[in-house]
Amino acid sequence: LSCHRLIACGMTLAAKFHDDVFCSNKFYSKVTGITVAELNRLEGIMLKLLDWSLVVLPGEFEMYRQILCQVGKTELEAMSQTDEGHGQMGATWNACGSWPAGDGSAGQAARRRSAATPARVEAS
């Protein structure tokens, strides 16, 4: 199982779960490059592994968001120490809701836009 197949199957399930009108597995098969038979099989396996529960509770989402934020922060810090990351830090917005230091005027404008919009939208 490759990460490509995992993401393709997850995105297919997410689209079906969140949208009242969704495409057929034949369409998703063409988009992802996975055969219809394999996508059907992966979909069934993933649903069984998830115990047919596709809902992500807010607390669970927040836990994984914090983990990803920490990993992202570590990666950004590592990039800033190399030539590879030079010049990219100012344009990088991390999911934790903060800008890396030294972001300049583009970052300041984005922070103003970000402050004007709510950080989280609760489902009703």
Image: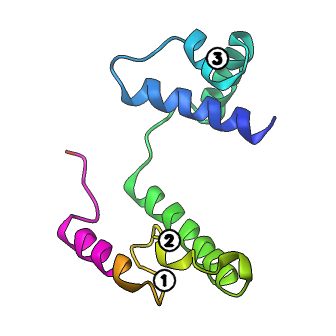
Q: Is residue 112 magenta?
A: yes
**Front-most of 110 and 121?**
110
- State which mark lies toward you, 3 or 2: 2
Q: Inspect the image, locate mark 3, and give the three-letter code of the amino acid beneath it.
A: Ser
The circle on residue 91 is none
Q: Which residues are magenta?
A: 108-123
- Residue 52 seen from this side: no
Q: Say which residue appears at 59% left-offset and 34% top-offset.
A: 10
- Quarter of the image holding residue 61? bottom left
What is the CA distance from the residue labelled 3 to the residue labelled 2? 33 Å
Would you name the residue on which mark 3 appears? 29
Q: Say which residue appears at 33% left-offset and 20% top-offset.
A: 20
Q: Inspect the image, locate mark 2, and give the three-letter code of the amino acid beneath it.
A: Thr
Tag 2–tag 1 contact (CB < 8 Å): yes
Q: Secondary structure at mark 3?
A: helix
Residue density around tag 1, few if under 14, some if 14–19, many if 20 or more, within 10 Å: some
Residue density around tag 2, few if under 14, some if 14–19, many if 20 or more, within 10 Å: some
Q: Inspect the image, locate mark 1, and give the three-letter code of the amino acid beneath it.
A: Pro
Residue 35 position, x and y percent, is: 73, 14
Which is nearer the N-term, disc 3 or disc 2? 3
Which is nearer the N-term, disc 2 or disc 1? 2
Would you name the residue on which mark 1 appears? 100
99 up-or-down from 30: above or below: below
In the image, taking residue 71 as reference, residue 62 lies left or right, namely: left
Would you name the residue on which mark 2 appears? 92
Image quadrant in which the C terminus is located: top left
50 up-or-down from 26: above or below: below
Residue 28 position, x and y percent, is: 58, 19
